[in-house]
Image (spheres, rainbow, N blue to C red):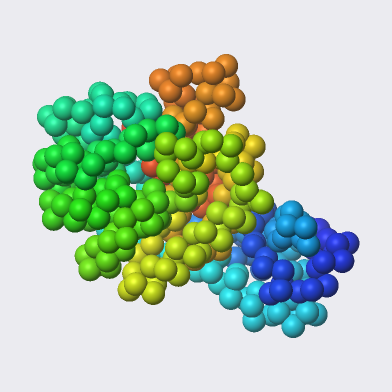
């Protein structure tokens, strides 16, 4: 039996109880199946196959700064019972541990691989390489052959500092590619524009991926609701042109969870069920390297929202800043490390530029852990 420390109760704020503190749960002691077999009372993380038996609670103190305490599930339940919050805690644990729905992807074991296809002249890593329709189609086919479970197709760069692209030009870029690839694997349309979403869905896309979480175009919510399709809601701090201009948070984990929770609620009010929602923390979309480090460390906090989770860290600039200012073309090892970290935190979807390499890394990771 693995022993775990009790909940650290030194902070007087904990006397206020689970509900009044607005607690977020960060699963710790995340276990693979062979490890979980020797641990009592472990819960599945987002339905499994990983499990957890220990949590860190994160909440805002009186001054707004985040405070934390760590303990076993048993200790957490004992604390909630003392403060009259047992039902609220069990609801939070259920959201963290319940099985997630299957979206219309290839059906491969999770985490599933989402290949990036930028039909743009100015994306940060591959801008211009696939701006030609035929070349883009060929690259999409190559990613599918390499094992992509879904392909995410976009006609507008969302890199920091990027200028917007009008809807008509986005449609011109992406629709022929979608028509050529439709029916092979599910396709998502990466756009914030309702007209682009509608045209892409009509051409054969089956998922909407919106970096503004359906806020930039007031008609986008209705398009997704009427289509009945899944939607990926990403957090970003403003628009690409300005999102990296001195990004600031009270606490990046709590602020992003609060934002995504509000967007899930807005979708539900519009008729888009949470079972159709995937959340994405938007790595690098308005964050310093310190923000990214904290968000990556506590990535599993997102499972408390009760939805599927996507991680898109592939080739991003923070990887280069961590290692000799490597350009995007030299960031594959860091991208694979980020993907494997996401897998170890139960993320269901990995949005990547390098499909074959990510697939192989995941297979070795899963094999080594008996998954």
Residue 264 against residue 288 in the figure, above or below: below
- Along the line of sight, which residue is nearer the eye, 50 or 127? 127
- Along the line of sight, which residue is nearer the eye, 26 or 156? 156
Q: Can residue 113 be seen in this view?
A: yes
Q: Which residue is depicted at the point 56% across and 61% down?
A: 258
Left or right relative to 138: residue 12: right
Residue 272 against residue 280 in the figure, above or below: below
Q: In which quarter of the view is residue 198 placed?
A: bottom left
Left or right relative to 300: residue 108: left
- Along the line of sight, which residue is nearer the eye, 126 or 110? 126
Q: In which quarter of the view is residue 127 placed?
A: top left
Residue 185 against residue 89 in the figure, above or below: above
Q: Which residue is depicted at the point 33% across and 30% down?
A: 123
Left or right relative to 255: residue 106: left
x%, y% of residue 163? 34, 34
x%, y% of residue 222? 27, 66
Q: In which quarter of the view is residue 84 placed?
A: bottom right
Q: Which residue is depicted at the point 16% across and 27% down?
A: 132
């Amino acid at each position: 039996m693995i022993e775990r420390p009790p909940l650290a109760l030194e902070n007087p704020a904990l006397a206020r109880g689970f509900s009044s503190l607005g607690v977020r749960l960060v699963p710790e002691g995340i276990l693979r199946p062979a490890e979980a077999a020797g641990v009592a009372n472990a819960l599945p993380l987002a339905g499994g196959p990983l499990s957890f038996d220990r949590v860190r609670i994160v909440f805002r103190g009186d001054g707004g700064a985040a405070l934390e305490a760590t303990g076993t599930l048993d200790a957490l339940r004992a604390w909630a019972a003392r403060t009259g919050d047992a039902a609220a805690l069990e609801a939070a644990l259920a959201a963290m541990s319940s099985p997630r729905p299957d979206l219309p992807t290839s059906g491969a074991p999770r985490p599933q691989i989402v290949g990036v296809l930028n039909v743009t002249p100015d994306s940060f890593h591959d801008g211009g390489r696939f701006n030609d329709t035929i070349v883009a189609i060929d690259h999409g086919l190559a990613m599918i052959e390499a094992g992509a479970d879904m392909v995410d197709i976009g006609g507008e760069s969302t890199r920091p500092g990027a200028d917007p692209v009008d809807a008509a030009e986005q449609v011109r870029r992406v629709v022929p590619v979608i028509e050529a690839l439709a029916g092979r694997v599910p396709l998502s349309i990466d756009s914030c524009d309702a007209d682009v979403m509608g045209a892409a869905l009509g051409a054969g896309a089956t998922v909407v991926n919106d970096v503004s979480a359906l806020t930039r175009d007031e008609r986008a919510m209705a398009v997704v609701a009427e289509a009945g399709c899944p939607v990926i809601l990403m957090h970003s701090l403003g628009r690409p042109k300005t999102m990296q201009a001195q990004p600031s948070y009270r606490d990046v984990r709590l602020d992003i969870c609060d934002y995504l929770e509000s967007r899930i609620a807005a979708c539900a009010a519009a008729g888009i069920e949470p079972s159709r929602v995937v959340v994405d923390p938007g790595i690098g979309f308005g964050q310093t390297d310190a923000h990214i480090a904290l968000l990556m460390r506590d990535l599993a906090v997102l499972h408390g929202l009760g939805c599927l989770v996507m991680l898109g860290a592939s080739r991003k600039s923070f990887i280069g800043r961590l290692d000799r200012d490597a350009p995007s073309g030299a960031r594959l090892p860091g991208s694979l490390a980020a993907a494997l970290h996401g897998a170890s935190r139960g993320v269901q979807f990995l949005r990547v530029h390098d499909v074959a390499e990510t697939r192989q890394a995941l297979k070795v990771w899963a094999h080594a852990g008996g998954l």
